[in-house]
Amino acid sequence: MVFVKGLGAPETPRLLPADKSWVCVEMAPPRSGVTHISRDGEISAVARTGLPQGVAPAMDGTIWTLNNDPAASLMRVTLDGVMEEVLGEVEGKAMLLVNDLCFGPDGRLYITDSGMTMADWVVDGAVRPDYASAEFQGRVYQVDPATLDARILDDGIRFTNGVAFGPDGYLYANEMISGDIFRYRWDGPDAIGAREVFANVMTTGWEGGFHGPDGMTFGADGNLYCTVFGEGNVAVVDPSGEVIGRLPTEGQNPTNVAFGPDGDSRLFVTEHELGQIEILDTETTALPLYYGGPERVEV
């Protein structure tokens, strides 16, 4: 089932806590920017940016997003279209290709940086042919949205992509080139553990070209739901790290995922190839997300 069509390379569907409508980003020009979608699927532009990627709404109505054109940065956007670029480097290092973000239980933003500029990643309109052996400086950042104090939590990841907090309190991020899902023990903003490999969502023996984990979210069942770009599915990973199922998408390039509101057991999946948000049935509901405060918010 399709919720919305006609989007330009959409990414990161997220519910707004105030009215349970949606925002996402569209990456393909001339539509590139933050887009609002009503509960019944009406589309309207919020703000047009160069190359957006990832979005995280806050309880105060602010929408935090990432932009990669002309340079990588964290941006603050309002629903009436006011945009402000607020951060472009962390610990003296320029952001390279910021990808996804979420709020943590400390109210801070946790951001992935894929570790290579878009100009180096996309060559002649396609992913560079040596992507499997290319050098990456993929990172995970922590940013205080009130003060913009920021630090690097991890470095040296090969195309960091999706990010989420699990029901176990761990911070999860994935590595697109290897297919690994990493996790970090989280005991507070200043007590974050070392990288651990939790799972791998690649299909064994895949010969279909570039693929790997993209956006992800957790269900109330404790399972991780991770889009696998290039493979046309959402991998379902149980708390032990085993892939226990795959939910097929209409297009081959799903980019991110979120559960619907009000205990809805359906997944809303942005699909890059066909420019749409698809709906997939599950047997669970959302693990509530953080929206900039210490409590998970159920929408």
Image (cartoon, rainbow, N blue to C red):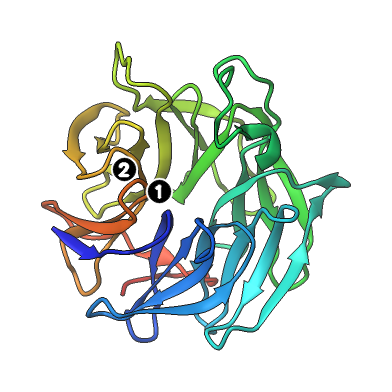
Using the image as rendered, state which of residue 31 and residue 110 is in the foreground. Answer: 31
Quadrant holding the N terminus: bottom left
| Residue 257 x, y percent position in the rendering | 33, 53
Instruction: Report which quarter residue 158 is drawn in.
Output: top right
Q: Residue at coordinates 31% horizontally, 75% vertically from top-left?
A: 299
Crowding around mark 2 (Cα neighbors within 10 Å: few <14, some 14 to 19, many 20+) is many
Instruction: Report which quarter residue 144 is drawn in.
Output: bottom right
Residue position for label 1: 166
Q: Image height check: is 292 above or below 191? A: below
Q: Residue at coordinates 46% horizontally, 50% vertically from top-left?
A: 164
Say whether marks 1 and 2 touch (CB < 8 Å): yes
Q: Image height check: is 249 above or below 71? A: above
Name which of mark 1 and mark 2 comes first in the sequence: 1
On the question of residue 179 being in view, the answer is yes
Q: Amino acid at mark 2?
A: Leu
Q: Which mark is residue 133?
A: none
- C-alpha distance separating marks 1 and 2: 8 Å
| Residue 239 x, y percent position in the rendering | 29, 36
| Residue 129 x, y percent position in the rendering | 56, 20
Using the image as rendered, state which of residue 91 and residue 271 is in the foreground. Answer: 271
Q: Image height check: is 249 above or below 244? A: below
Q: Amino acid at mark 1?
A: Gly
Instruction: Report which quarter residue 88 is drawn in.
Output: bottom right
User: Residue pushed farthest right?
Assistant: 92
Residue position for label 2: 224
